[in-house]
Amino acid sequence: MQNTTSDAMANAIRFLSLDTIVHAGEGHQGVPLGMAEIATALFTRHLKFDAANPTWPDRDRFVLSNGHGSMLLYSLLYLTGYEKISLDQVKTFRELGSHCAGHPEIDPACGIEVTTGPLGQGIANAFGMAVAEAYLSARFGTAVVDHYTYAFVGDGCLQEGVGQEMISLAGHLRLGKLVLFWDDNKITDDGATALSISEDVAARFRAADWQVIELDGHDVDAVSAAITLAKQDSRPSLLACRTTIGRGIPRVQGQRGGHSARLFSDDADAARELLGWPHAPFVIPADLLAAWRTAGRRSAADHTTWRARLAALSPDDRAEFERVQAGELPAGWREVLLSYKQRAAADTEPKPGIFASAEINDLLVEILPERIVGCADLEAPTSHKRSLAAFTAEDRAGAYVHCGVREHVMGAMANGIAAHGGAIPLAVTYLAFSDYERPAMRMAALMGLPVKFVFSHDSIGVGKNGPTHQPVEILAALRAMPNMLVMRPADAVEAAECWEIALDCRHTPASLIFARQALPTVRTRHSDDNLSRRGAYVLAKPEGGPRAVTLLATGSEVSLALAARDLLQADNIPTAVVSMPCWSLFDAQDADYRHAVLGNDTVRVGVEAAMRFGWDQYLGQRGGFVGMSGFGASGPAEQLYTLFGITPAAIVAEAKRHL
Amino acid sequence: MQNTTSDAMANAIRFLSLDTIVHAGEGHQGVPLGMAEIATALFTRHLKFDAANPTWPDRDRFVLSNGHGSMLLYSLLYLTGYEKISLDQVKTFRELGSHCAGHPEIDPACGIEVTTGPLGQGIANAFGMAVAEAYLSARFGTAVVDHYTYAFVGDGCLQEGVGQEMISLAGHLRLGKLVLFWDDNKITDDGATALSISEDVAARFRAADWQVIELDGHDVDAVSAAITLAKQDSRPSLLACRTTIGRGIPRVQGQRGGHSARLFSDDADAARELLGWPHAPFVIPADLLAAWRTAGRRSAADHTTWRARLAALSPDDRAEFERVQAGELPAGWREVLLSYKQRAAADTEPKPGIFASAEINDLLVEILPERIVGCADLEAPTSHKRSLAAFTAEDRAGAYVHCGVREHVMGAMANGIAAHGGAIPLAVTYLAFSDYERPAMRMAALMGLPVKFVFSHDSIGVGKNGPTHQPVEILAALRAMPNMLVMRPADAVEAAECWEIALDCRHTPASLIFARQALPTVRTRHSDDNLSRRGAYVLAKPEGGPRAVTLLATGSEVSLALAARDLLQADNIPTAVVSMPCWSLFDAQDADYRHAVLGNDTVRVGVEAAMRFGWDQYLGQRGGFVGMSGFGASGPAEQLYTLFGITPAAIVAEAKRHL
């Protein structure tokens, strides 16, 4: 069967993967053994990459969306010569601290573009990378931005809703430089795909205006020819590759066990026999390794000419390109926010929380052209388009992606944009629908991608649209997520401060959470300092004696706490109000600051139109809480606040109850 | 334009909706004005229902998946004569306490089958109802179970991933009695659908083996004829109805504002002029109202004959049918669990947590045939199929639905099954992927549907598959959700207890969360009492003096706490171990019990391989915590426990630090 050098090179992937999985005692052999020829065609004949310069900005992107097949990627990275992926490193597959983790973990310097594993995320990330490429290419020209994005995908990724959303939106946007390779092996973990799908997958892609090419995934030449066609088409392409899962292992190939059944050295021996691979475990013949290493530098010359083209840009353009690639912000952006903040402090007119964010973002359009805003069919109520043009099939210079009612792919697209580099993604929807994109948000947090997740309609303040649209538990659910900065500003001043913090984040996603309803200005005295940066701060000091009560509040409830403070002060109870826009930033402060803010020896009452869950860490033994204890209701917002007892009077009563 | 009685009846919907929305000052007119003729065709000529007996088990189910168009439903319910939906009630649309809430809120007695609003959920619920119908029909025969499920759906529901998953799975399962009516009006909130979709929706459905009928949605006869075709086909059907959004209002019809722009009485007047509706606001001419009321009883005779057929069942079958319809459990099920529990207490062999749940469920197969188990392509590792047959296009008697890698529709299907009644749904996947079905879980909690969400692989105990597959924040995120019982059993004994609690739940969904890894038996002494029912209990008492330390643990960490207790006791530190399988049940106990369990004057240390978030409510001023402070890693589970410091020695150190 090993008729050509390409076939032999594919077998180098296959046996390196197989030997490593046997060595590790577990792994998922289905993908590396089933997609070895596809990978060979892509990496040796098409992929623009340079293993010696893995982070070359204009490299083609490669995403292994079926991330459980990670051994395929590690084999490729070793064979093509990525420095950090030595053979010894490969042998640590699935061990603690290995670059070769159970699922690929983002590390572009190693050739791993994104973390994959949860199915569907990878292809949606790839879609985001293609969006970023198109946008950057429109901004900087094809001389410096002109690459493809390729993704390997299994049945699972295509069954997931996020994958389906991606198919629809990528087809709509005609992202012709996005190419998927479907490992059409008719097997999932449960067994035959016929157990759970009878859909005509090719027809489904065609319905969304993709080019679909059906071919034999074990024929390197056929795959290569299909890639050529894919690159020529203005539509995104699906290469539907018929493959045999676990190909080469007589005991499991083409069967359910091909996916990840435990393999033994007998299996490796039998595969050697079947495929005519006489080499000992982990031995790659020198000629094949040399051929692979040559493939690993196949675009080295392209890289050199690209550098020349970059150098030929105008100094301004080049500096700007390098700035956005480095993820650095330009001079002046901070001043825009500061100036807005100063005006906001003087503005006594209440303003919908989300509109403060919208105004801020509109002011940043000129100075931060690297922002790409996705929104899930809520343009008017979230208002983050304003002067942005739409990113469309015809106009790649637009920075606003109408994502349709597809929150999940919006979030995963944002991750892909961030992982691509050169752009800062925002993803905008209602907070109640954050659950729809939560799997993508988790991946942003896990990868440390600086995505800005923007949410409006953050509480019962939504009013008559009722409990489906009223978050009560979602603030807590997001705060529980590691490495996710959750911010809920109290007014336009804090909105500006939180945006400053979010834009400063380079390795952490941020959730910026805004009210739908009009919020009065609570920070009426301007301060150049970003008070929100410490997570919580004393907004109003006690008067007339030592502090007896501390009211801790966030977002729309800060003004209620201030009103309650007035009532308590009128009763001669010295009361402080603490605004807590970001818990995790506060938690990172030193103990002295935290104790000073919290007022450790005082009665503390948390105030938030949400569940108490998580609040107790700040409330202490004499702690009270005014908020929600269940889902909301449909009715006018002000009536709901009364119904659920979130009022200044209720705050006063709760404080007194604990005094 | 008002040529026939049917057209006039449609206008009765249209103007009642319009007048109510003008009266309320807000609402979404797009759906009621655009789908009035479709609704008329369905409700007056096809829908099997009896407004005087709204909860007739064999009624056709109707779901308004585009729930923002709720006024359409309320108009229908009033016109057809649902007692609770009087005209006065309709006039309270969107007011606090109204049956006519902003979005429909589940109340079968009012004719509202499920709560809808978050897009895509409703059609996925409808799919679940169709699964329940097919299953119950196979169980009890078509004499008593033989109905259709109809859903109205807008573009948003079809863009959402969960909707796409539904299309694929419903087509695969050939649920021929599921009929969708697509309000193909080319408009979403952002404006033209062309902003975000260019997909051939009909082709997409056909790719998934649906019957698709394209027609004029304002032609009552055409809609009726299409419904007849839909009912005759063995495939699920999409009626793609071309409509005009907001039809009748000259200022906004067919435009973006048709969706939900504020309307005024001038708009209502103009619509009256355009459509020739001379009646005053809220006035429905007597003949039309009579025609509608006749439609509301159109299946009354069917209902009578159905009751006769029910009466003709064998007494056993009838009793069983009535039992499952009432959601009551049969005699003997509790004893099955008790017997298992007794054996488990005596079993010293460690067992994977999820397998305890699998064993329990397998023992229940005979006695609880109303369970329908959905699983997202994880049959082997979750093991909840065992002796169940698969539910397939050919065999509706099977109770195991291979959902494919589609967690979201699995969860929403489970909600639909529960809302249908007559069956108890389980939805099984890994805990890390609960995020994918979280929007459906939220709806289960909001609706109070007794769905059993079963999760495996609940911590870093997953090991080498790494952080994508290791939940750390998800326990907290679920515990924050109101009305969701979150249970994490420590061993097979607690597993049996938690299953007993979950099965007793009639109005609350439960999340049953299990470890992948083998857990030693910690409850080695059998007790007939269900100790888990109080949420937390003292598992090991202090010895040698008054309690100095209380270790609070859940799930797989309880055995670590016990080992730590041994070490502390060896140092003469009297230590109690509290197992806390369910926080919310514990929170509901009286203060005396809670204080006694928590050991208020002791050092308390929480132990859980998860984030601390939420734990502080139990830890007090002298509280410590041993758990995770960030995401996990890829490596052997036991090494991860050491790496992240979740060991008996670390627990001891944390306790001593606070002593």
Image (cartoon, coloured by chain):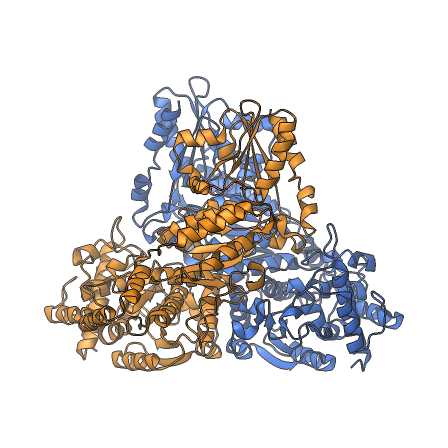
Chain colours: A orange, B blue
Residue B136 on image: x %, y %:
63, 63
- The quarter of the picture where residue B302 lies is bottom right
- The quarter of the picture where residue A287 lies is bottom left
Residue reaching furthest to the right: B286
On the question of residue A521 being in view, the answer is yes
Residue A368 on image: x %, y %:
40, 60
Task: Count the labels in the image.
Answer: 0
Q: Quadrant of the C terminus of chain A?
A: top right
Q: Quadrant of the N terminus of chain A?
A: bottom left
- Would you place residue B63 above or below residue A334 in this image? below
Residue reaching furthest to the top: B545
* A640 sits to left or right of A337: right
Question: Residue at 82% of width from left, 74% of height from top?
Answer: B277
Residue A141 on image: x %, y %:
32, 73
* B231 sits to left or right of B267: left
Q: Nearer the viewer, residue A396 or A93?
A: A396
* A88 sits to left or right of A382: left
Question: Residue at 18% of width from left, 79% of height from top?
Answer: A4
Question: Residue at 45% of width from left, 51% of height from top?
Answer: A337
Residue B533 on image: x %, y %:
57, 37
* B36 sits to left or right of A550: right
Q: Nearer the viewer, residue A462 or A24?
A: A462
- Would you place residue A628 above or below residue B136 in this image? above
Q: Nearer the viewer, residue A126 or B38?
A: A126
